[in-house]
Amino acid sequence: MNSRPATVREVALQAETLRDFGHLCQDWLHTLRKVSSRNAAAAAIHAEPPLLRARFSQGEVADAWLAAMAELIAQRCRIEVPVWARSPKRILRHPWFAEEKSGPEARIIALRDSPSAFKKRNLYAAAVDLPLRLRAGRPKHTPEQLRQANAKRQRRFRERRALELELLRGAFRAL
């Protein structure tokens, strides 16, 4: 793992065990903190990740988890849920609780507090971290884009001033 995964597909491609998957998901969530637009969020969930059920034990949990995260992101950003996330292959047959070793109270809390995207897939977790915070306003621009926009604005200003000056000269000559 040289760099943090930027997409759900990269998480799945790099995961070799369920433990790896957990660490990669955390890294991916850290990467999502920098996402500030709907387009960037859509790009993070668009590409279909390969199924992990054959790669390692409890890979079907990882498959369902990625689909649930993709749907949750889509809901929060008000974008289309990727088609791959709706696949029946990404729904667990039996309920899975993130708090397996906890008592029945923890399971009840997980049943109550799990987001609907997770419940649909038979996943139950009391707390699901989604650090996505879209910024209101304009999307970020590169310094080059800002320079180009400023140059255009300056040209328009100069053209308006030249036109005003010409109109004033014409009015002065008419006197």
Image (cartoon, helix red, strand yellow):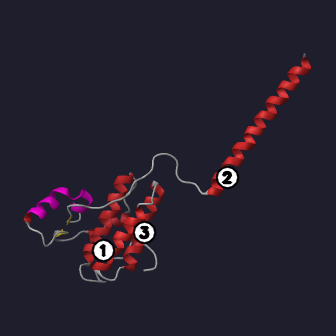
Q: Is 84 contained in the magenta span?
A: no
Q: Between marks 2 and 3, how big is the CA–CA gap?
A: 30 Å
Q: Is 114 contained in the magenta span?
A: yes
Q: Nearer the N terminus, badge 1 or badge 3?
A: 3
Q: Nearer the viewer, residue 74 or 169?
A: 169
Q: Between marks 1 and 3, how big is the CA–CA gap?
A: 14 Å
Tell me which amino acid carries mark 2.
Answer: Arg
34 relative to 167, above or below: below
Foreground tag (1 vs 3): 1
The local secondary structure at tag 3 comes to: loop
Quarter in which the N terminus is drawn: bottom left
Where residue 123 appears, x then y in whole percent?
21, 66
Quarter in which the C terminus is drawn: top right
Q: Nearer the N terminus, badge 2 or badge 1?
A: 1
Residue at left 27%, top 61%? 128
Where residue 114 appears, x then y in whole percent?
21, 59
Q: Nearer the viewer, residue 64 or 170?
A: 170
Considering the whole magenta stretch, tell me its main secondary structure.
helix
Residue under pointer 3: 7
Label 3 CA crowd tier, 10 Å (few <14, some 14–19, many 20+)? many
Residue 86 visible? The answer is no
Label 1 CA crowd tier, 10 Å (few <14, some 14–19, many 20+)? some
Where residue 52 appears, x then y in whole percent?
31, 78
Quadrant in the picture for residue 81:
bottom left
Residue under pointer 1: 22
Residue at left 25%, top 73%? 61
- Judged from this view, the residue extending furthest toward the top is 175
The magenta region covers 105-119
Residue under pointer 2: 147
In screen coordinates, is 64 left or right of 31?
left
112 relative to 137, above or below: below
Where residue 21 appears, x then y in whole percent?
32, 76
